[in-house]
Amino acid sequence: MTGLKRYKKYLLPTLIFVLLMWGGLIVCQADLHSLIAGIPRGWDLLGHMLPPDWGVFPYLLAPALETVQIAFVGTVLGAVLALLIGFFAASNLTPNKPVREVARGVLMLERALPDLIIILLFVAIVGLGPFPGVMALAVCSIGMLGKLYADSFEEIDPKPLEAMATVGANKVQIIRYAVLPQVLPALIANTLYRFDVNIRLSVFLGVVGAGGIGFNLIMSMRLMQYSEAMTAIIIILLLVISCEKISDFLRQRIIGQEVLK
């Protein structure tokens, strides 16, 4: 009886979770029978994609490189803008409440907008090509990075800031010598993580016409050139894995050195 009382408090949350999950499966029209019945069609499509057409491999390297460049430039631009907004969004660096609330509102608004809407907006403004992809990734990075940067600023030790303010240091000097040394490892880690996300997102950009290897992938699928599509998929997998390994290496080397210091 005592054991039942111990688990009684978990009964209602568990029941609510089960009901929400059950209702979600109904709304999403989840059908295990359809999934199992469709597996042979998936194998049939995979059979048309194999073996890959290695003859188009050299021609897909340039779009793959363009994908990396879109992700890199978009991440850098987004990180710079997020850093500026993050300063104003941090309560310990911006005592002016209206300015702080405006900065937080900008970050919240960007996070509330789906990435697809932002991407389609820039495609409509600029047209097709890599430039709208860069701008879309930059804007998509601001909300996430700005929030993470602001949280990092608010978690710093206030004593170095107070000490520099006491000796008459200005705002720029305080940020340069008291704030950045404390948050630099977190800034680098968050930025590299966002770069990993943008690599994957930049592939999706090509699907909506914003350049990169994603465009080649969707065109091969539409033209039913499945062997070429498989080659593009393999290149995308190698690209994502390589960029992730490089990001992990840089994160370990740079952040590790900063932590040791």
Image: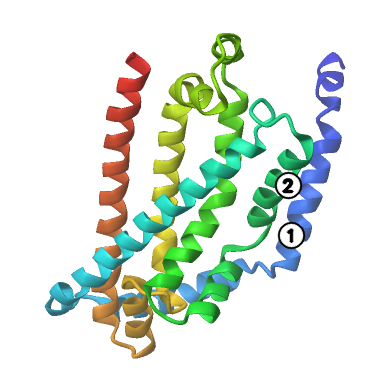
Earlier along the polypeptide chain: callout 2 or callout 1?
Answer: 1
- Please tell me in which quadrant of the rendered image residue 228 appears: bottom left
Tell me residue 159's x, y (percent). 58, 10
Q: Coloured how?
A: rainbow
- Please tell me in which quadrant of the rendered image residue 88 appears: top right
Left or right placement of residue 11 versus residue 156 in this view: right
Figure quadrant of the N terminus: top right
The answer to whether the residue labelled 2 contacts the one labelled 1, judged by CB atoms less than 8 Å apart, is: no
Tell me residue 140's x, y (percent). 54, 57
SS at badge 1: helix
Q: Is residue 145 visible?
A: no
Residue 92: image tag: none
Give the residue at the far front of this rendering: 168
Tell me residue 239's x, y (percent). 27, 57
Q: Is residue 195 above or below residue 35?
A: above
Residue 102: image tag: 2
Q: Amino acid at mark 2?
A: Val
Q: Is residue 70 above or below residue 180?
A: below
Q: Amino acid at mark 1?
A: Gly
Name the residue that disc number 1 marks: 24
Q: Is residue 61 visible?
A: yes
Give the residue at the far bottom of this rendering: 223
Left or right placement of residue 239 versus residue 179 in this view: left
SS at badge 2: helix
Name the residue at 40% across, 74% down: 206
